[in-house]
């Protein structure tokens, strides 16, 4: 069940806006904003987003206070919008749309990508949901340009869930060590609860993860369409090398360490 996706993203702008985003820095404050949230009402703690995608409670936020940003506000907003799409499309099981925000064009192993799609589809309909609940962005690196792309690194507080519906056949405890290894023992909480919908009671088992994590952002030089990679990409050196230069990855990690982690 391990993938590089959700740790399990709009149109091209004018050339003038593209140039302003390329040349932007941390000049001026970033306006506090929130993207996302449910478009309807429900009393359910975990709505079935396969049936009701509009009820997704996912929110992507950034605050001006305490934000270490080295990117212009317009660029940050575009990244937030695409990050919302990336997570939301995963939450509702729209894999083709989600993969538009994954740099699949940079890998020759297209068979691996299809295997991942098939695996996510299988478990999604067998009662296991990898679901992002929210991301609060606290650090945004400057863009670093490579031959045909620009790369940035985000630092965020992530709210993330593994939901196990009643039709899931297996023991959720089998995921505990993997989650603790990825996010830290103190970041992972297991809980069980009942929820009632139309008179029917459903028992839900769930891991809730509250953790500080990172996300790489990749964008072609001639586009404002953003794609995303989780930090675990570094554990797959061959795939990581296809996605970005090793020097770029190291430089972005160094910048985050010096301008955010040590503050």
Image (spheres, rainbow, N blue to C red):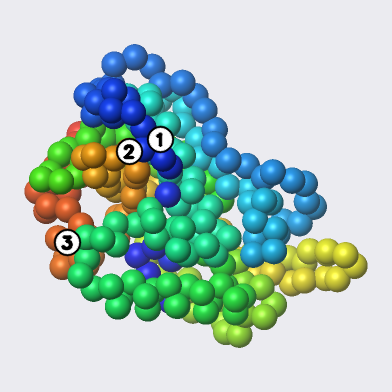
- The quadrant of the picture occupied by the C terminus is top left
Contact flag, marks 1 and 2 (Cβ < 8 Å) = yes
Residue 46, by quadrant, is bottom right
Residue 126, by quadrant, is bottom right
Q: Secondary structure at mark 2?
A: loop
* Disc 2 from disc 3: Cα separation: 20 Å
The residue that disc 3 covers is: 242
- Which circle's residue, 1 or 3, is located before the other in the chain? 1
Q: Residue furthest top?
A: 28
Q: Position of residue 186 (x, y in %)?
A: 46, 56
The residue that disc 2 covers is: 224
- The quadrant of the picture occupied by the N terminus is bottom left
* Disc 1 from disc 2: Cα separation: 8 Å
* Disc 1 from disc 3: Cα separation: 24 Å
The residue located at (26%, 35%) in the rendering is 141
Q: Position of residue 76 (x, y in %)?
A: 38, 31
Q: Residues within 10 Å of mark 2 (few under 14, many from 20)?
A: many
């Amino acid at each position: 069940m391990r993938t590089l996706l959700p740790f399990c993203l709009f149109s091209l702008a004018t050339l003038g806006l593209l140039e302003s985003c390329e040349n932007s820095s941390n000049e001026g404050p970033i306006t506090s904003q929130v993207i996302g949230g449910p478009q309807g009402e429900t009393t359910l703690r975990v709505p079935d987003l396969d049936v009701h995608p509009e009820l997704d409670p996912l929110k992507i936020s950034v605050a001006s206070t305490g934000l270490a940003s080295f990117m212009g506000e317009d660029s940050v907003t575009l990244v937030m919008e695409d990050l919302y799409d990336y997570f939301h499309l995963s939450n509702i099981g729209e894999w083709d749309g989600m993969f538009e925000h994954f740099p699949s064009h940079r890998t020759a192993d297209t068979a691996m990508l299809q295997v991942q799609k098939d695996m996510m589809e299988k478990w999604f309909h067998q009662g296991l949901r990898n679901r992002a609940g929210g991301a609060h962005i606290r650090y945004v690196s400057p863009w670093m340009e490579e031959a045909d792309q620009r790369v940035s690194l985000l630092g965020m507080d992530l709210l993330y869930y593994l939901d196990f519906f009643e039709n899931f056949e297996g023991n959720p405890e089998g995921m505990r060590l993997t989650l603790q290894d990825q996010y830290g023992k103190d970041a992972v909480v297991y809980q069980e609860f009942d929820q009632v919908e139309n008179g029917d009671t459903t028992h839900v088992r769930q891991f809730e993860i509250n953790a500080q994590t990172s996300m790489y952002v990749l964008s072609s030089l001639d586009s404002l369409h953003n794609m995303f990679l989780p930090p675990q990409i570094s554990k797959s050196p061959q795939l990581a090398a296809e996605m970005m230069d090793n020097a770029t990855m190291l430089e972005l990690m160094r910048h985050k360490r010096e301008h955010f982690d040590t503050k």
